[in-house]
Amino acid sequence: MYNQLMKKFLAISLLFLILTNSAFAENKLFNLRLFNNNERGVISLLNSQIKYANKLNFEKFISTYDTEYKNGDGYDLEVYSRLVKDLWQNYDNIKYGIKIKSIEFEPNGIAKVEVIETSRADIPVTKKMTGVLNSEANSIYYLKKINGKWKVTSDKILDEVTSMLYGEAANLDIKLTAPKEVTSGYEYTASLEFAPPKDTFAIASIARDKVEYPQKQPKEVFRKLPEDNILERLFIANSDGANEYVVASIGLTKADIKDLSIKLSLTGFGYQIIRVNVVNKELSEANNDQKK
């Protein structure tokens, strides 16, 4: 039962992560200044996505994207559309938020919009255990006027963290760290730290997986949390041109001793997932040369 729950909710959380860069959110750009027509058009496009997503209006929502859309993970509009459908079939209660940090217009007519996105949802598991989903992403959207209408042509996620925590795990102060960007084929370290509740046995794992669709289940190797409450793993970034997720899985149990018998009960479990963007080796070396 425990392993089945872990696998089920991890798969859903990875699917959700892929979609956190979508502007399904209430626009909170209330700067005291006048917007020009292009700025108003960009903001209107984002607000339209909000309205259609909240109503689960798939056709209208997808219509805000250019047919040639491709995001920073290499997904075209066909794949992205399948992801949206999959997500909406599993969740209809996520509350989205967005803060627009800046809007810039490039000479080629592209609008570059940097945003902070947040998402939250209550997730029931059993009558005795509930969960909470929280996500935050720093993203950039690229929009272009096509036939007089603004469309999203691409987007990329600079960094993000998503957690799905259940039972007592929802109260943990979890710190999962890894580089936001690494060079393909190079080593990097991921670290997990949290203090389990008193009299609780904690196990954890750190895994990584490529950002791909359909999302595969990363290989998990659970270990007892060390006495210093820190777990680390060394990874080598893939050379396939794909970005990666670092996935921390956590399990909490308590022992109930009665009549010389020991009964272990699951008191909490969950995941925290962060993004590691993988940069092509040749491109990384070229950028380093330019900085010298």
Image (tube, rainbow, N blue to C red):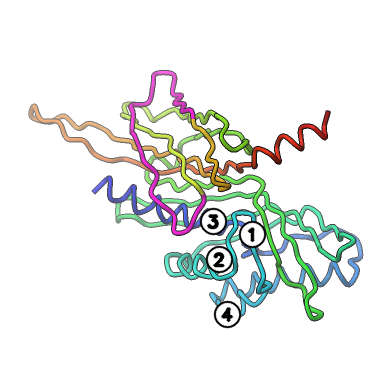
- Looking at the image, which is closer to me, 26 or 37? 37
Q: Secondary structure at mark 1?
A: loop
CB atoms of marks 3 and 2 within 8 Å: no
CB atoms of marks 1 and 2 within 8 Å: yes
Q: Is residue 201 above or below residue 180?
A: above
The residue that appears at 58% across and 47% down in the rendered structure is: 241
How far apart are the alpha carbons under marks 3 and 2? Answer: 9 Å
Residue 269 location (% of width, % of height): 36, 42
Q: Which residue is mark 3?
A: 18
Q: Is residue 10 above or below residue 33?
A: above
- Category of crowding for the residue at label 2, using alpha-carbon neighbours closer than 10 angstroms: few (below 14), some (14–19), many (at least 20): some
Point out the residue furthest to the left here: 259
Q: Which residue is mark 1?
A: 71
Q: For the residue marked with disc 1, what is the amino acid? A: Asn
Q: Is residue 290 left or right of residue 275?
A: right
* Mark sitting on residue 80: 2
Q: Secondary structure at mark 3?
A: helix
Q: In the image, is residue 199 part of the stretch drawn in magenta? A: no
Chain-order first, disc 3 or disc 2: 3
Q: Secondary structure at mark 2?
A: helix
- Looking at the image, which is closer to me, 199 or 244? 244
How far apart are the alpha carbons under marks 1 and 2? Answer: 9 Å
